[in-house]
């Protein structure tokens, strides 16, 4: 038994020696393995950085692409709205151009008519009883001066002419008193619509009326009290009352 055990010892010693040699050899290769592992890890880290960079770039490009699509859609809608606006403006321009032609044609037709209205108003004032002559003639002169002005629109010219006609119409249904001169005398005039124009001196020593047939003022003191009362009514100093005024009968009347 001892012999058998003694014979195995050399084999165990050889195996142990082999293990020691392998361990020494492996220990000698450890630094190299560490360097290779570190290089591989560094390479993997760099590769991961590249992958992350590519992924980030891909995401940025995707966002940019999506933004471009949204901008393209916005521009498409804007262009549609712009085309609609341009079409609407073109229609409006055509309408304005047509209205301009119509206004020009209307001006050519209405300007002579307005000039005729001014002439008619002037003739009417000349034939009417001569109350407020300066005011009424001055109004007509302003109308004539206005007709030659280019800075006054046609509508404004027409409005002022119609306004002058309305003022003249108003004279026919009002009672008025005002101070004026008759020759070298200062008198009080009494206008009763358009049917009578009388005067009276402030001291009531002279009273008269306008004679349309003679086209002159005629003295007639018989109307002194009536004119005095009429002046008070016109000045609102007394309540309205019946007054007697001279009215010439129409020619041919009995």
Image (cartoon, rainbow, N blue to C red):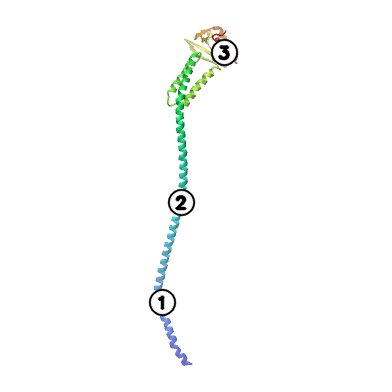
Mark 1, Cα crowd under 10 Å, few <14 / some 14-19 / many 20+, is few
Q: Circle 3 is placed at which residue position? A: 230
Of pointers 3 and 1, the one earlier in the residue sequence: 1
Label 1 vs label 2, nearer the camera:
2
State how far apart marks 3 and 2 are (Cα). 91 Å
Residue designated by label 2: 69
Q: Where, by quadrant of the figure, is residue 173 drawn?
A: top right
Query: Residue shown at 44%/88% (left/top)?
Result: 9
Kindly identify which residue carries mark 1.
27
Tell me residue 23's x, y (percent).
Answer: 42, 79
The answer to whether mark 3 and mark 2 are in CB contact below 8 A is no
Mark 1 in CB contact with mark 2 (< 8 angstroms): no
Q: How many dots with numbers?
A: 3
| Residue 200 vertical placement versus 112 (above, below) | above
Question: For this rendering, which residue is in front, 67 or 17?
Answer: 67
Mark pair 3, 1: CA separation: 146 Å
Q: In which quarter of the image is the C terminus?
A: top right
The residue at the point 47 percent across, 91 percent down is 4
**Where is residue 188 drawn, in percent x and y?**
52, 12
In the depicted structure, whether residue 14 falls above or below residue 199: below
Residue 200 in the image: state x and y as whole percent.
53, 10
Q: Between disc 3 and disc 2, whose residue precedes?
A: 2
**Could you say which is closer to the camera, residue 116 or residue 105?**
105
Circle 1: element type: helix
């Amino acid at each position: 038994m001892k012999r058998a055990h003694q014979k195995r010892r050399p084999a165990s010693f050889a195996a142990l020696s082999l293990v020691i040699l392998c361990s020494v050899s492996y220990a000698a290769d450890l630094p190299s393995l560490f360097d290779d592992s570190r290089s591989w890890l560094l390479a993997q880290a760099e590769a991961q950085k590249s992958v992350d960079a590519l992924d980030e770039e891909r995401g940025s490009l995707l966002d940019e692409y999506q933004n471009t699509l949204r901008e393209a859609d916005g521009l498409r809608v804007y262009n549609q709205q712009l085309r609609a606006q341009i079409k609407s403006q073109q229609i409006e321009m055509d309408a304005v151009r047509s209205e301009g032609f119509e206004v020009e044609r209307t001006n050519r037709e209405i300007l002579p008519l307005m000039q005729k209205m001014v002439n008619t108003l002037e003739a009417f004032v000349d034939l009417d009883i001569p109350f407020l002559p300066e005011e009424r003639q001055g109004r007509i002169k302003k109308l004539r001066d206005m007709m030659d002005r280019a800075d006054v629109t046609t509508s404004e010219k027409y409005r002022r002419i119609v306004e002058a006609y309305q003022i003249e119409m108003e004279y026919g249904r009002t009672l008025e008193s005002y101070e004026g001169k008759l020759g070298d005398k200062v008198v009080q005039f009494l206008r009763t619509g358009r049917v009578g124009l009388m005067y009276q001196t402030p001291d009531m020593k002279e009273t008269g009326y306008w004679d349309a047939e003679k086209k002159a003022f005629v003295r007639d003191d018989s109307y002194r009290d009536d004119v005095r009362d009429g002046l008070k009514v016109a000045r609102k100093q007394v309540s309205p009352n019946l007054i007697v005024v001279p009215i010439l009968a129409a020619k041919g009347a009995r």
